[in-house]
């Protein structure tokens, strides 16, 4: 055996190591907290665990459905359900996203599967933009803090932002930027997706076949590992935002009126959003103190779509131009929603 062959054999037998930016960033942040702010360290850990527990049921359901669809070959039926005229698909996706109980993190496996199966990006974008903005529990909490009118308007805004984003991507659909939105590796087995469309018959009781059962387990583990690293980092960053960006600073930044104040509220909402439930009482207090309700709406819309968990989830899945388009559409939709609501009230 030659020297080159010996080296090649040794390399193949050595355990492989791949640098993972998400876990590395999480480790460095936790190390920095332990060294420089020991009091915040347990608080961030507690916040991280609380948020993971909150999102876990939705995440488990989404991952399970995506894995079941792949193992049983039912993903072909899902793709068929999303077939038809793209305009109708955008409308249905925006309505479903605005009314569904899923957050943007929970729908990632299904979104990846839909994109891989050829569902048009405009429909996926409509669903993705509207889904984190409203769900049943958020609706009733909004009624309790900001009133029924605000809650209904935010629900309408969620659907409207989805429609706007879907039709905007449809108008730009011929651009090469949107031709292949998924990052390399996502569509060939990662995060609920399968690069090859199944031609096998659908077997609803897939567990009777060894190969399908193995595919189910593999898909569950892939999706869970992929999502967990990004969600842990996202919730950790959100805990730091809550700890180090005081509510008073946010309130001072939102003290402007008119369309300029609405635009500033949307800009501030992108990085400074606390979370869906913590932001509501803050906005309620500011509105009672004389803040323009349109600015409050813009803040909640922009922050809901582009909060750390939502934005990082999108960033982990799609290419950079699609991610930037997602943020731009969220900002534009927030400003438009805020301006319209300000005129109504």
Image (tube, helix red, strand yellow):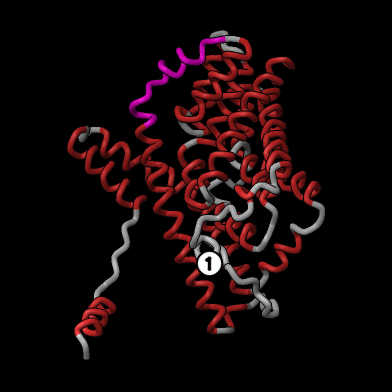
Between 175 and 242, the one nearer to me in the picture: 175
Q: Which quadrant of the rendered structure holds the C terminus?
A: top right
Disc 1 element: loop
Magenta span: chief secondary structure: helix
Q: Residue at x 70, y 53 (%)?
A: 120
Where 60 falls versus 341 (above or below)?
below
User: Residue 127 at x, y = what percent?
Assistant: 66, 46
Q: Which quadrant of the rendered structure holds the N terminus?
A: bottom left
Where 191 falls versus 279 (above or below)?
below
User: Residue 69 at x, y = what percent?
Assistant: 63, 68
Q: Quadrant of residue 237 in the image?
A: top left
The answer to whether any part of residue 61 appears in the image is no
Farthest residue to the bottom: give it.
Answer: 1
Residue 63 lies left or right of residue 139; in this view the side is left
Where 298 falls versus 184 (above or below)?
above
Q: Which residues are magenta?
A: 241-256
The answer to whether any part of residue 37 appears in the image is yes
User: Residue 180 at x, y = what percent?
Assistant: 60, 55
Residue 5 lies left or right of residue 164; in this view the side is left
The image shows a total of numbered marks equal to 1
Q: Residue at x 54, y 82 (%)?
A: 211
**Does the magenta portion include 249?**
yes
User: Residue 253 at x, y = what percent?
Assistant: 47, 15
Between 140 and 102, the one nearer to me in the picture: 102
Between 89 and 236, the one nearer to me in the picture: 89
Q: Residue at x 64, y 34 (%)?
A: 139
Provide the residue designation for mark 1: 188
Residue 4 lies left or right of residue 342; in this view the side is left
């Amino acid at each position: 055996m030659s020297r080159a062959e010996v080296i090649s054999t040794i390399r193949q037998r050595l355990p492989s190591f791949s640098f993972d930016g998400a876990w590395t960033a999480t480790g460095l942040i936790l190390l920095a907290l332990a060294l420089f702010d020991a009091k915040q360290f347990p608080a961030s850990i507690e916040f991280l665990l609380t948020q993971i527990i909150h999102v876990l049921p939705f995440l488990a359901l989404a991952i399970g459905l995506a894995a079941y669809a792949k193992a049983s070959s039912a993903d072909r039926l899902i793709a068929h359900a999303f077939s038809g005229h793209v305009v109708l698909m955008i409308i249905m996706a925006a309505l479903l996203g605005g009314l569904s109980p899923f957050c943007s993190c929970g729908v990632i496996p299904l979104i990846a599967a839909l994109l891989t199966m050829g569902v048009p990006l405009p429909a996926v974008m409509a669903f993705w933009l509207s889904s984190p903005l409203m769900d049943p529990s958020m609706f009733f909490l909004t009624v309790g803090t900001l009133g029924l009118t605000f809650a209904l308007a935010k629900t309408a805004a969620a659907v409207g932002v989805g429609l706007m984003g879907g039709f905007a991507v449809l108008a730009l659909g011929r651009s090469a930027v949107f031709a292949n939105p998924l990052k390399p590796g996502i569509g060939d087995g990662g995060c609920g997706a399968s690069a090859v469309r199944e031609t096998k018959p659908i077997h609803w009781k897939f567990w009777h076949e060894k190969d399908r059962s193995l595919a189910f387990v593999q898909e569950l583990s892939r999706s869970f590992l992929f999502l967990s690293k990004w969600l842990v980092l996202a919730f950790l960053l959100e805990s730091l935002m809550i700890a180090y960006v005081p509510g008073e600073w946010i309130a001072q930044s939102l003290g402007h009126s008119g369309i300029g104040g609405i635009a500033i509220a949307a800009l501030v909402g992108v990085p400074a959003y606390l979370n869906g439930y913590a932001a509501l009482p803050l906005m309620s207090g500011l509105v009672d103190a004389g803040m323009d309700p349109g600015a409050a709406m813009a803040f909640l819309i922009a922050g809901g779509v582009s909060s750390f968990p939502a934005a990082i989830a999108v960033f982990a899945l799609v290419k950079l131009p699609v991610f930037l388009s997602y943020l731009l559409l969220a900002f534009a939709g927030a400003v438009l929603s805020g301006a319209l609501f300000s005129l109504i009230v």
